[in-house]
Image: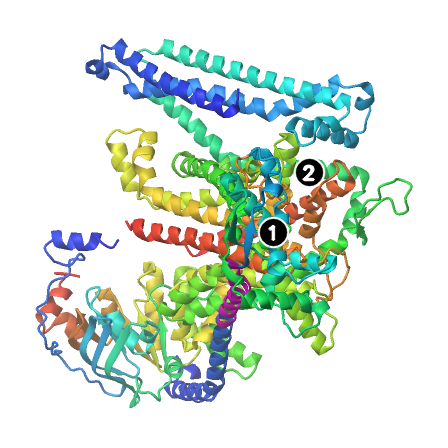
Amino acid sequence: MQTSTLVLVLLILAAVAYRAGRMRSLALVGGLKGASKLHSRPGYYGLLTALWCAIPALLVLGLWHAFDGRIVTDLVIGGMSAEVQALTPDQLSLVLNDVRNLVAGAIPAEMASPEARAAAARYVELQSLSGLAAAALCLSLALAAGAFVWLRISPSLRARNNVETIVRVALIGCSTIAIFTTIGIVISVLFESIRFFRQVPVTEFLFGLQWSPQMAIRADQVGSSGAFGAVPLFTGTLLIAGIAMLVAVPVGLFAAIYLAEYARRRVRAVIKPMLEVLAGIPTVVYGFFAALVVGPLLRETGESLGLAVASESALAAGLVMGIMIIPFVSSLADDMITAVPQSMRDGSYGLGATQSETIRRVVFPAALPGIVGGVLLAISRAIGETMIVVMAAGLGANLTANPLEAVTTVTTQIVTLLVGDQEFDSPKTLAAFALGLVLFLATLSLNIIALQVVRRYREQYE
Amino acid sequence: MATVPSDMARRTGGSLPDGGVQLDRSESAHRTVGDITAKNPVLVCRSVNVFYGDKHAIRDVNLDIAHNQVISMIGPSGCGKSTFLRCLNRLNDTIPTAKVTGSISLDGQDIYDKRQDPVQLRARVGMVFQKPNPFPKSVYENVAYGPRIHGLAGDRTELDEIVQTSLQRAGLWAEVKDRLDAPGTALSGGQQQRLCIARTIAVNPEVILMDEPCSALDPIATARIEDLIDELQQNYAICIVTHSMQQAARVSQRTAYFHLGDLIEVGSTDQIFTNPRHKLTEDYITGRFG
Amino acid sequence: MNDPALNPAAAENRAQRTRRLVEQSLRRRYRAERRFRAYGIMAVALGLCFVGFLFSSIISTGWTVFQQSYLRLDVSYAADVIDPDGSGDLETIGNADYSGLIKAAMRKQFPDVEGRGNLRDLYRLASDGGQFDLRERVLRDPDLVGKSETLWVLADDRVDLYMKGRIDRELGEDVRGLTDQELGWIDRLVADDRLEKRFNRSFFSNGDSREPEQAGVWGAVVGTFLTLALTLLLSFPIGVAAAVYLEEFAAKNRATDFIEVNINNLAAVPSIVFGLLGLAVFIQLFGLPRSAPLVGGLVLTLMTLPTIIIASRAALKGVPPSIREAALGMGASEVQTVMHHVLPLAMPGMLTGAIIGMARALGESAPLLMIGMVAFIVDIPHGFTDPATVLPVQVYLWADSPERAFLERTSGAILVLLGFLLIMNATAVILRQKFERRW
């Protein structure tokens, strides 16, 4: 049975359970006239029955689907020859791929080996068996749970309270998803990273100056162990993020100051949204802009000045990233500046300060903690930004501080290592997760510090 | 909050929410009772009107403010006394909708004249605000702020000296001399307000405007500020807005009574409090409304 | 009081000094004031310039995508080519050599062209994609076999570039990509009204293709729609539920604080990290298919949840406590109060937040690269598990393509993407203005 049909059947069952529960509660007290004898409104009895009918069955179905693929695969492998079972995980995954393709009809049956064909047949068989088992289990569970509650319905059953408890538990479950996401991120990058660090020492990864992850295919080949020294990646990331901040911080800050302190209300109402358009543009558009407009423009300008500018220069990526971050900085700074109480400005004007003196010497220092928090968040965003650098920065890991040369970044390398067909468990694939771990930790600490600073600042003036 | 107040006003029959009494507001402004002039005036205000957008906040006020004298401005809340005070150093300029007409002259020069620079004016007419508003800087930097921006000190020792004498004259030196680097916001409320006064006198103004300087302070801190005002009076013209009639009686030589944008009565403080000539003044003094 | 500093005459002198010094400083200070103000104006102007430059460069390269060059050819559906045995069998008809028909039509147009090489050049003026149109026409109406009709078929991307003025005639043959002979043919076709720019149907109905003139955004649009539909379906209810719990029910304790910190932090985690999560958990652990809108939707759900939760909480905060007190006072339970009174009042704000979250998800591409939505996919996806790509990733793929004609496609796809974003943001603004209620 198809999963979607199964879900549909379960929902229909739940609807039936609702009616049944409601009818039974009414029947117990002699119809609608006796409804006041019930602890809760009749609908709640129906709802309780329906929830009990649907929720456990759906949960089981979800769990089943999360794991049946693996179990089926394991069983298929178990049924294959000892020869196949002795293969390395890499080769095994290739064989499995063949079997799956065979099942999906992506490769004609004539092209496959008899063993693969047999495995495919077994795969199909197991899959349909699994589907049937899931259907049987879920439906019987739904019926059993529904019937259990239905039988327990009595006028004194606190149906509303029970339903509300279920609702509350569901709400709690939803709000903990954020925690599970964080845990999921940590576990998924941490485990793969640990496997990576078993093959490549942590010290080499963190302090090595050579990065060339393209592994040789044969073990005896020269340079067969790729180099995984990530320092050029870190410097490249910092270089591009630094250029971005050099663009975004002054422009964003001055724009915010002008709009918050000088501009008239109407001018502000027009210009502020126009600048914020920059924040709504997808990063891939910036990437396109950096790679195909700004990059060539810089190279030509460099040529006419007699400078050698790489077409994938750090400058191009950094500049465009800076443009992207301008509205981020300016709207945060704007918030912080407007949070400075008017009495500060009055105090300064009252002493005869000009407007710029007031801004520079009173408003800005007062808003500084908040602005610093905002800038930290902006840096975290610059470090984690992917599309611009994937499209506009280079792939070669140069250890340089020259913005006119091409550098590569952590995010670029993650994408390059993971896009396309990957071999499982090769250091190359695992390295991407190690880089992800570094990226996550770096942005996490920046975010936590920044959010803390901003929160303290807000509390100060509230 | 857009709809609620109007609903409330309708329900309570149009009287103001704060219980203010309706005054017969004829077209012509009220003629002030008492002598508006003063000997040795520093600020001379003639037919001053202030508008906030459509609202006529101050109506045709005439008043002199004299050297070495404290004048207090009293009246029910919303009567325009603070607005009037803010006209005297053009702090209303920072509110885009505010408009001031009439003439206010400082030593014979109109402060709303095009040639008059607001920066220079505010250096000469200092202001202390209702809520202590020290800058988020150290005590030292708070006091040094004015001299620094105006370039009043040639070098560091001179600046140190200005800071010290200002703090001494504000009666704060003894309390803060060991923690000049502590943030100004770390002081107590009364100390903060004296710091703001020190900040103001560090610029050597001619007039000090005080907008309810004690309303946020406890009685002991208030008493200290009042003593300070007494001392400062020897050197400055002081104009204080206050809610407290007792305070006005204690610190000022002259008193002006404002009501709904009109200057009702001016006179010596003794006369106003013992023998008010206008009915509204009397009602206010005797506590009929406030 | 015999301190000389407090002597009125000294005070007078000090005031004089202040006046003098302030007057001296004024010019310098007003210059600084003007300079500072100029910096502000410059920053704003620079920001606006960036906006203008960005849009003008995208629009100027992209607006031509709405038109495409088509050739008007007299195609004869020769029975001996399409259905040699006259059986009318659809499979035979489907497998016929339609590109041969186009070649024949081209030959008929230029009977004077001879020689293998020359003919090959001639055929290359028409796009390879025309044959699919012909095939579809015949399959839809098999009676066409044996007849002939005049049709507009797709021209090659080089012809299209020339027609749009992006190839300079004056350049050398090797640089411009069109030979003199080909240019001559093009001129003749134009003169005969047989080559012109028409509305670009294929761009809005095709999937991806290696040939620029056949590449379209429809596949990516459908993929985007499927992915975002799943994202909305999952993230909105979950986000609202989480916000309701945190805002209405949760006690202020460590656990709640921890959840809050997590949400705020997740909102600032780089999107690519969510891609790693999706790859490790959904694909490698759960064995869900790669490149599928299903996984894309799940990853984007996790990514947009914090945004939706934060916006929904703000909307709930905006509902005044008096409403809750009134409902509780009537004897409603807490859950009833929230479900019947608070939630409906906060709904417009929550919807606005959801749309903004969706707009952000629409522009996201980095995590989708991780889960394989970058594959070259020609077919239009039909379900959540079909391989698919999304608009921003399509932009990324085309931006990487070497053919010049893809530049225009890329900008065109960006315009489509920005169009969708504009619609979503405008909806959010209208929603906010229409339902905004001040308490």
Q: Chain of mark 1?
A: C
Quadrant containing the C terminus of chain A in the rendered view: bottom left
Work out whether residue B87 or residue A241 is closer to the camera in this orientation and state it: A241
Which residue appears at 68% of the width and 28% of the height? A100
- Locate residue C167, reporting x and y percent: 62, 68
Give the tally of numbered discs.
Answer: 2
Work out whether residue A51 or residue B75 is closer to the camera in this orientation and state it: A51
Work out whether residue C32 or residue A180 is closer to the camera in this orientation and state it: A180
Element under disc 2: helix
Which corner quadrant of the image does residue A115 belong to? top right
Cβ atoms at labels 1 and 2 below 8 Å apart: no
B88 shown above or below A12: below
Which range is magenta?
C45-68
Q: Residues within 10 Å of mark 1 (few under 14, many from 20)?
A: many
Q: Does residue C47 belong to the magenta stretch?
A: yes
- Amino acid found under the numbered disc labelled 2: Leu
Check the image and tell me how it is coloured. Answer: rainbow
Does the rendering let one see residue B185?
Answer: no
The residue tagged 2 is A190
Q: Does residue B13 belong to the magenta stretch?
A: no
Which residue appears at 62% of the width and 51% of the height? C128
Q: Nearer the viewer, mark 1 or mark 2?
A: 1
The residue tagged 1 is C102
